[in-house]
Structures are given as structure tokens and as C-alpha cells.
Image (cartoon, rainbow, N blue to C red):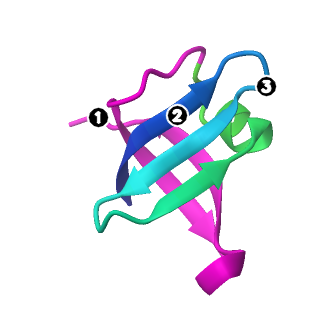
């Protein structure tokens, strides 16, 4: 699914994204590393994969959105 990078901490390689419905979801270093990114800037469009539902939903993969 698509989302927008909302926050990113380069030191911890973690942050959060906003899904297209406005739902914020955090991601950790493992999800960031799985996408092969080196840097992420707030506002960039990204593609994410999630696991779980409701409050236990988490981002497992984040990479740049490509056309």
C-alpha cells in the first residue's frame, strides 16, 4: 500500500508514515532496512507492507514509491 513519510530519525533508522486514510503507523529499523533505503525525507511517497490488524498493526517494509 502507499503512504507518505511523516517522520524519520536517521540515527535510529525509525520513524512513521501516514497512510492515505490519515492513519499514522510507526516503523522500526528492521522495516527501514528491509526496503533497502539509505535516507528518507518527510513528505516522500513510500510503499509499505504491514502486518497485523487494529492497534497491533505494524509496518514491516518501507521503500520509495515507484511508478
Residue labelled with disc 1: 66
One can see residue 36 in this view: no
- Where is residue 15 shown, x and y percent of the image? 62, 38
Q: Position of residue 41 (x, y in %)?
A: 44, 21
> Is 64 positioned to the left or the right of 15 in the image?
left
Based on the displayed image, in which of its 4 quarters is residue 6 positioned? top left
- Label 2 vs 1, first from the N-terminus: 2
Mark 2 vs mark 1, foreground winner is: 2
Q: Which residues are magenta?
A: 38-67
Q: CA distance from mark 2 to mark 1?
A: 20 Å
Counting other residues with Cα less than 10 Å from the Cα at mark 2, is it few (<14), some (14-19), or many (20 or more)? some
Whether tag 2 and tag 1 are in contact, CB under 8 A, the answer is: no
Q: Please determine whether, in this image, residue 61 is positioned above or below residue 59.
A: above
Name of the residue lying farthest toward the bottom? 54
Using the image as rendered, state which of residue 22 and residue 36 is in the foreground: 22
In this figure, which residue is indicated by the disc labeled 3? 12
Query: Which residue is found at the position 41% from the left and 53% from the top?
Result: 18
Label placed on residue 27: none
Q: At 55% from the left edge and 15% from the top edge, which residue is drawn?
A: 39
Mark 1 neighbour class, 10 Å CA radius: few under 14, some 14 to 19, many 20 or more: few
Q: Determine whether label 1 and label 3 are within 8 Å by CB.
A: no
Quadrant in which the N terminus is drawn: bottom left
Mark 1 or mark 3: name the one nearer the start of the chain. 3
Regarding mark 2 in the picture, which secondary structure is present there? strand
Relative horizontal placement of residue 39, taking residue 32 as reference (left or right): left
Q: Position of residue 35 (x, y in %)?
A: 60, 35
- The answer to whether any part of residue 66 appears in the image is yes
Which residue matches tag 2? Answer: 7
Amino acid at each position: 500500500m502507499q503512504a507518505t513519510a511523516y517522520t524519520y530519525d536517521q540515527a535510529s533508522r525509525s520513524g512513521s508514515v501516514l497512510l492515505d486514510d490519515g492513519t499514522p503507523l510507526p516503523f522500526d529499523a528492521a522495516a527501514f532496512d528491509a526496503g533497502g533505503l539509505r535516507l528518507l525525507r518527510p513528505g516522500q511517497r513510500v510503499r509499505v507492507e504491514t502486518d497485523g490488524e487494529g492497534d497491533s498493526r505494524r509496518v514491516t517494509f518501507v521503500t520509495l514509491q515507484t511508478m
